[in-house]
Image (cartoon, rainbow, N blue to C red):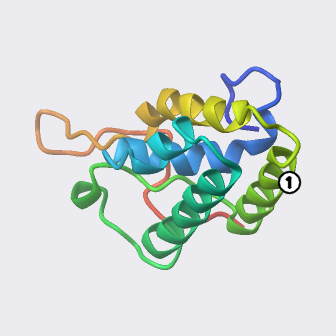
Amino acid sequence: MMGNNTPPGPLSEYGNLVKTLAFFAAARNYSYVDRLGNSLSYESVQMALLDALRDFKSTCIDGKPDPRDLGAYCPSVDYKRLENEVARLLESLKRDTTLRTARDLALAALAESLKYIYREKPGGEPSKKEGSQGGASS
C-alpha cells in the first residue's frame, strides 16, 4: 500500500515505487517524474524507472544521506519489493499502449512528495516527517 490516505486502486500495488519517485520530487529532482509523465514509448518509461532505481539505491539504500543536504528524507522502502514492483509495472505496460499507469504514477508521486520534504522548525530543529531519515526497511 502507498500510505494510509491512499485509496485502493490500480496504483496501490506500486507503493514502494510511488514513495521512491516522491522522494526525488521532494528533493527537487523532478527528472524521473517528468520522464514518466511525458513518456511516449515503453522504452522511455523503462529507462526512467531503471535510472530512478539505480539513483535511489546509491542515495538511500547504500548511502546514509543527511536530509539537510538533500532537502528530503529517504522513505522507508523494501528494495526487493521495489524491484518487483518495477518489473510488474514494466510487464503491464507492454500491454498498455497509452502508458497511462506511468503518467498516473508520476502524478501520485508528486502528491506524495510533500511527506518527504525536509524543513527546519524556527529553532533550527528538523520537523517531524512521515518519511524515515534514511535506509531501507526489511
Q: Quadrant of the C terminus?
A: bottom right
Q: Quadrant of the N terminus?
A: top right
The location of residue 109, given as percent across then percent down, is 54, 36
Viewer-closest of 9 and 98: 98
Q: What residue sits 69% from the left and 28% below the top?
A: 4
Q: What residue sits 49% from the left and 53% below the top?
A: 132
The location of residue 111, given as percent across then percent down, is 50, 26
In this rendering, is residue 4 above or below 21?
above
Instruction: Please tell me whether mark 1 sits on a helix, a strand or a loop.
Output: helix
As drawn, is 92 to the left or to the right of 75?
right
In this rendering, is residue 123 above or below 20?
above
Q: Image quadrant of residue 19?
A: top right
Viewer-closest of 12 and 66: 12
Viewer-closest of 68 and 23: 23
As drawn, is 118 to the left or to the right of 63?
left
In this rendering, is residue 63 above or below 73?
below
The location of residue 124, given as percent across then percent down, is 13, 44
In this rendering, is residue 104 above or below 92?
above
Viewer-closest of 7 and 132: 7
Q: What residue sits 46% from the left and 48% below the top?
A: 23
Return the residue at label 1.
91
> Residue at the left extreme?
123
Q: Amino acid at mark 1?
A: Glu
The location of residue 6, given as percent across then percent down, is 69, 25
As drawn, is 81 to the left or to the right of 119?
right
Q: What residue sits 69% from the left and 62% below the top?
A: 78
Crowd rating for badge 1 (residues with CA inside 10 Å; few <14, some 14–19, many 20+) = few
